[in-house]
Amino acid sequence: MKKLLALFAALALWTCSNDPKPSTPEIEIEETDASTAVVIEELRHTKKNLDEAVIFYGLLYSKGYNYKQNILLSHQHETSSKQEEALAMGAFGADMSFASVFGQNIDAKQYGLRIAELAQEMGLGQSFTNDLMQQIASDDSSLNKTHIISMAYLDASDQLHSEERGHYVALMITGGWIEGLLISTSLVLDKPGDREINLDIFDQIYNYHTAVKVLEAFESHEHCEGLLKQLREDEPFFKELLRTRGNLGRRDLEDLDAMMLKLRNGFLSIEAEE
């Protein structure tokens, strides 16, 4: 599981890079148990999708889509459980990536700080130190803040492994998927997309299967059980959208936007007016 978490750390922060074609280290992984094997397989599948997520935000930016701060999970949002903390860390990674690609460096920095704060709350203070948080908050443009956070995630993987908290990996992946798809859908609702954009959103919808599989690897864990149950109940909705093969109409996008907002706000305890 140690190497699994290290791979997740590399992939999760990889989406925050300003490089439209970022690279990730090749990591040899030994599959030691059934849960690890399932999540590893899905992480291998999502490696390509994470790269495409950054490129997709760049595509939206190049086609004149506007940055929408109000659709993002507020970096000031307070979590009330360990489950919410892990989901929020994944969601904030998507928010930081979106802000970075759209050149919103202040917002990107705030999300980086919030990720570090959540790590402290999750008991990962050995990796996400006060010194690290000060570096992220710094206005020093010579600091590669994405790299700084990436290294902290990698260090934290050792601690998570030793404490057998690998289920947080599944929650982080799912939180990032929910937030990323919500961002994409909200932007395209404001400005209907062309065939290329709709196909990219279709690919993100397909990652519903990835979220379900990684949660299933830890379905006996109380932190994953409720979210997995909800996603299984919503399976007919996602299957119906997948039948469109990317020919998404406005009603499809409206329903998808409402679904992703429901999932995010429901599992992060966000009131409708927030």
Image (cartoon, helix red, strand yellow):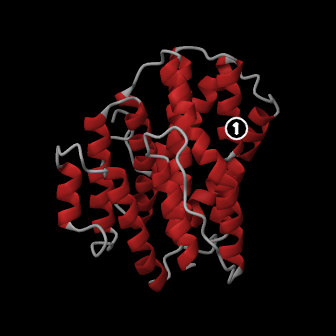
In what element is the residue under mark 1? helix
Seen in the image, is 125 located left or right of residue 94?
left
The residue lying toward the viewer, choosing from 274 and 214, is 214
Q: Quadrant of the N terminus?
A: bottom right
Residue neighbourhood size for the residue with mark 1, other residues' Cα within 10 Å, grouped as few (<14), some (14–19), many (≥20): some
The residue lying toward the viewer, choosing from 118 and 138, is 138
Q: Position of residue 205 (x, y in %)?
A: 67, 39
Q: Is residue 76 visible?
A: no
Q: Position of residue 16 (x, y in %)?
A: 43, 46
Q: Where is residue 44, by image quadrant?
A: bottom right
Residue 68 drawn above or below residue 274: above
* Amino acid of disc 1: Asp
Q: Which residue is mark 1?
A: 203
How many labels were placed on the picture?
A: 1
Seen in the image, is 146 located left or right of residue 213?
left
Residue 64 drawn above or below residue 150: above
Q: Position of residue 141 (x, y in %)?
A: 23, 43
Task: Look at 17% across and 57% down and name the residue there.
Answer: 134
Q: Quadrant of the C terminus?
A: top left
Task: Look at 59% across and 44% down and name the residue there.
Answer: 51
Q: Where is residue 236, by image quadrant?
A: top right
Task: Look at 52% across and 46% down and name the residue there.
Answer: 22
Q: Is residue 31 visible?
A: yes
Q: Position of residue 30 (x, y in %)?
A: 67, 80
